[in-house]
Image: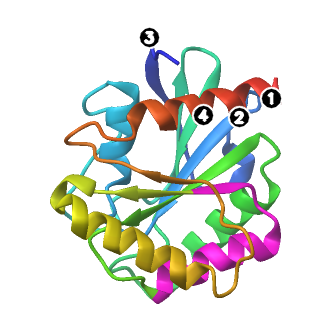
Amino acid sequence: MEINKAQFITSSSKLSECPKDGMPEIAFIGRSNVGKSSLINHLTGVKGLAKTSQTPGKTQLINHFLVNDAFYIVDLPGYGYAKVAKTMRSGFKKMIDDYIQRREEMVNLFVLVDIRHKPMKIDLDFINEMGEMGVPFSIVFTKADKLSRSAMMASLMAYKEELLKSWEELPPIFVTSSESGEGREQLLEDIAQFCKTSL
């Protein structure tokens, strides 16, 4: 799939404010500072489309980006919630849960995981929760350029082994780098398939 056009449409603080045109949505979520905005910019080829920041927790709303006038990429707040007040954290959780569980237009959720780290409880818990709820999702490992090929494969294997303790069959897995471009084409092909089957 080629992306010819991508534009920011709206930010929403609750589900009822999201677009109502019925177009399919591909959502991205991950722990704070996992490289979500960088990946969205890299996929769309539009620098600065999603705002990147060195400060974890920058995304605090549901952001919709219209792609090729055919589907949305949705940037969700990180589930680590970064350094925000407890009341805001509970608000984020409700906003994310509402979207993931009730948004009929969402055809797939991409859960982003930083490949540089050993399997982290926060990521494993979220992935397992998505499985228990029957949410259609894929796992996208980010920042692959930060590791040697052997270290990257070792990290990937460690995650797979950990997940297979509770999963009979793993969800689709992608390895990406916003710097080197690794995984971009495979991810776009997958997105295209999800959007076609929903139309």
Q: Earlier in the sequence, mark 4 or mark 1?
A: 4
Q: Residue at x 34, y 82 (%)?
A: 118
Q: Is residue 186 above or below residue 146?
A: above
Q: Earlier in the sequence, mark 1 or mark 3?
A: 3
Q: Residue at x 55, y 25 (%)?
A: 66
Q: CA distance from mark 1 to mark 2?
A: 5 Å
- Location of mark 3 (residue): 4
Label 2 sits on residue: 194
Residue 41 seen in the current view? yes
Magenta-drawn stretch, dominant element (helix, strand or loop): helix
Q: CA distance from mark 4 to mark 2?
A: 5 Å
Say whether residue 89 is visible.
Answer: no
Q: Residue furthest top?
A: 4
Instruction: Look at the image and give the residue range highlighted in magenta.
Output: 121-138
Element marked by disc 4: helix
Q: Which mark is residue 191?
A: 4
Real-space Cα separation, disc 2 to disc 3, in angstroms: 18 Å
Disc 1 and disc 2 in contact, CB within 8 angstroms: yes
Q: Is residue 145 left or right of residue 6?
A: left
Give the residue type that dot 3 points to. Asn
Q: CA distance from mark 3 to mark 4?
A: 15 Å
Reading the image, the residue beneath label 1 is 197
Q: Dot 1 lies on which element?
A: helix
Q: Position of residue 181 (x, y in %)?
A: 28, 36
Q: Would residue 116 be found to the left or right of residue 156 on screen? A: left
Of 38 and 197, the residue lying toward us: 197
Local crowd size for mark 2, using a 10 Å CA cut-off: few (<14), some (14–19), many (≥20): some
> Which colour assignment does the render follow?
rainbow
Q: Nearer the viewer, mark 3 or mark 4?
A: 4
Who's the residue at 81% across and 30% down the image?
198
